[in-house]
Each structure stands twice: as C-alpha cells, then as structure tokens.
Image (tube, rainbow, N blue to C red):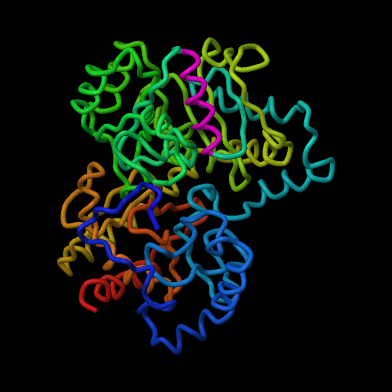
Amino acid sequence: MPSKLGRTESARSTNVAAESKLPAGAYAPAERALRYKNTLALAEQIKTVIPGGVDSPFRAFHEVGGEAVFFDKADGSKLTDVDGNTYIDYLGAWGPAILGHAPEAVVTAACAVMKNGAVFGAPHKLELALAERVSQALPSVESVRFVNSGTEAVMSAVRLARAFTGREKILMFAGGYHGHSDSVLASTGHQSSTGILKASQESTLLAEYNDLASVERLFQKDAASIAAILVEPVCGSMGVVTPEEDFLPGLKAIAERHGALLIFDEVITGFRVAYGGAQNLFGIKPDLTCLGKALGGGMPIGAYGGSRQIMSQLMPEGAVYQAGTFSGNPVTMAGGVATLDLLKDESHYLRMEARASELFAGLSKLKTEGGYPIELQRQGSMFGIIFAAGPVRNFSQSKTIDAPAFARFFHYLLDKGVYLPPSPFDAAVLSSAHSREDIEITLAQMEPALDFAFNG
C-alpha cells in the first residue's frame, strides 16, 4: 500500500507487510505468539468489519510488519494491551498525550461537563474560554475557529487562503504531512492516494523543505496563482526535521513579497515544542495557524486561526463555508481549557526537556560505543531515532532511512515493553508524565535492541 507520503522510492525499504504476522523480536516465535495471543485473535476478527482492521491506516503495522497491538488502558506514560502487557509509551497517541494519558485535571473537567450534555449544537462559554487562551498564547491568532481534527483545520485553512487571496494554488513541501484532504494528499510532485482529482493535484505545488531556492523557483514560475505556502515548522513525518536558521524567515519574506499567505501547520508542534507552538519558539508570525493534538490533551480537536481580517471571511461574516456538528463541543473545550491551564506552568516543558535530554544523552553514548548508523534529531519533546548514516534535513535525504533495521529495533522494544511509533519516519514524543526511571528502563532496552537491529 502507498504510505501517507507516497514514499515508494526508498533504497532501504522492504515489503515488511508481507512478512510473518510475528516478525523477529526479542523472544522466540512461540513466546511472541503467547505474549500477543489476544491481540492476534482480535486482529483477525476486526478485519472482517473494519478495512485493514484500523480506522486510520498509520495505526497498522504495515511499515514494520506484524499485527497492530490492541490496547485496553492508557495512564500517564504507560499503555496496557489486551494481553496484560505494559509499555512505556513514546507514541503519545501520535501527539495529543502531552500531559501523559488520562491526566486527572483533564478527565475531571471533561466528566463534569459531560453530565450537563456532551454536545449542544449551539454556542457556550467554554468555546470562549479556550479561544481566549489560544489567542493569548499565539500573537498571530486574533480569531480562531474550532474543528474536530488536524485534517479539518488544514482543509479549512487552505480554503480560506484561496478565498482571501483569490488564487487557487498551494505550495507545500515534500515529506510534509497535512492530513487527508485532497489538496495535500497529491501535488505536482507526489501522490499519496488514488481517487484524487487531477485538477486538485495540479493545484498543489511541491518544494523541498529547508531549500528556499526551490520555493523561489516555483514563485518565479507561478506567483500570481499561489495562494499560500503551507509548512510544518518542524517536520514530523520524515524523521524529525528542524528548520535551518534562515528557512522560516525566508518563507515569510517570500510570501509577503508575492502577496501569498504563510500557513503554519502546527498540528503536531502546537503547544508541544513550546507553549503556543513553534512560531513562538522561532519568532515567526504566520498568517494562518492550524492546531490539533496537544491542544485538546487527548480530546478530539482541531483549530485554525489568524488575523481578524482573514478570519472574518468565514461564514456567517463572510462567504467561506465551514461547519461541523461537533466542532467546539463542551467536552472537548473543557479538556482543552484544562490542558492549556496546566501547560501554562513552565515546569511541564522543563520536565519534558530534561527527560528528552537524558534519553538523547544515553542514545548518543550507545551510538558512539556501538558505531551504529543512526541520527538523533529532536525539537523539545518531539524526537526521532533515525536509522540513517547521516543527518536528514529534507525528504530526499529521508529516502536513505533503513526501514528493515528500524522494524527489527521496533519489534525488539515492543517485546520488552517500549512502544514507539510503528514507522521509521514518524516522530516519537515524550510527555510530562515520563519519569527518569522510564528513561533508564528505555535506555537499558535500547542497547540490545540496536544490536539486534544491526547485527541480528
């Protein structure tokens, strides 16, 4: 199957999906079969009623082989599966669990609101409370609209940018991930899904991340048609790739010079790499910002915002349509308010930075002592253990990632109770619930896992 980035060219990739349902790990096949007995049974059952057995394809293990683990419980930094195995979690539900799983304040707030009704289909005070907090945290966001996912946020921001500028084309970057709307699943340079209209594909241009010259070339050719530059300020789907010093300021300058908007997709980075997001960390003020994941602290959420001038184009003030039955529902808004009130305490970010530093210091030592061809790249609590012999700064370089070696690493750690994203390309994350002991246990298991990955 195609990956979410249309990644088919990697010289080091392999069809791990065609391997056994129990790829090689820390234990013998019989032990693994017993360890995951209930998961394997459920995996067969669920595929009869849900395509591929998952409601989102990157939850599947098609990039590492085997069957996706079924979970019963998440608490703090730990996950527990249906067989009773416990894991130190570095997936973080793909980003939302910034305070750990089921943080007491968020659970209490959501449950209290639920008693009064989960959804009204009408305005309420919690929408105002969260909107005010977002606006205070992000100077670029004078006005914000809540939706239910990051995909919705990006899709709506793209439509708004096209309406505001009167232009049709979007410029995005190879290796960036912006959800599953048609505008971002395919472009003039990639295709991550069938079923995309040719007109939609031709309306999205593709540049190289960290390469301003590639952006300039596209504007020189098509400036009058480009409505917006859409970018993850820190990329999380080709390793963790941070922007070079001049990259984000350069994008801002190019957009302003040509009358296009700059859209920051901070669905992953928002309230994770810093309070507010990457734009606060790097000192860049985009025209539109997309948020999700950590903003809700585990509740389903998305948001997009910008200046009042731009946001006033939305109905009912303007002519840009966007709607949603569950958008801004009281339960999600309560979770968001509780999350941001906790994150405003800097100690959460200091604790995550301390744990990430400890993890990377230990990994750096293992890399040096073992001579392993891995790169350690991170921004705050968002990190990548990249199976490549040199730094990955863009999508082209990410094609050198050794997917088979990562798959062996992943399954060894899985057997030993350490849960990473089931992908050699996607960002792992820490939460403020991770302890020093979690890091020590993780490093103790990563040493033999690296040996297993590269030496068998």
Asked if 372 appears above or below 253 in the picture, the reply is below
Task: Name which quarter of the figure residue 18 lies in.
Answer: bottom left
**Residue at (48, 38) in percent of width and height:** 267
Asked if 234 appears above or below 419 in the picture, the reply is above
Q: Nearer the viewer, residue 8 or 367?
A: 8
Asked if 162 appears above or below 354 in the picture, the reply is above
Tell me residue 113's x, y (percent).
78, 41
Q: Nearer the viewer, residue 343 or 250?
A: 250
**Residue at (53, 23) in percent of width and height:** 305
**Residue at (45, 12) in percent of width and height:** 166
Tell me residue 90's x, y (percent).
44, 58
Say whether residue 156 is magenta.
yes
Q: Main secondary structure of the magenta part?
A: helix
Say whether residue 452 is magenta.
no
Task: Name which quarter of the figure residue 227 lies in.
Answer: top left
> Left or right: where does residue 386 sit relative to residue 314?
left
Q: Quadrant of the C terminus?
A: bottom left
Q: Nearer the viewer, residue 11 or 149?
A: 11
Tell me residue 153's x, y (percent).
54, 32
Q: Nearer the viewer, residue 298 or 359?
A: 298
Residue range highlighted in magenta: 150-164
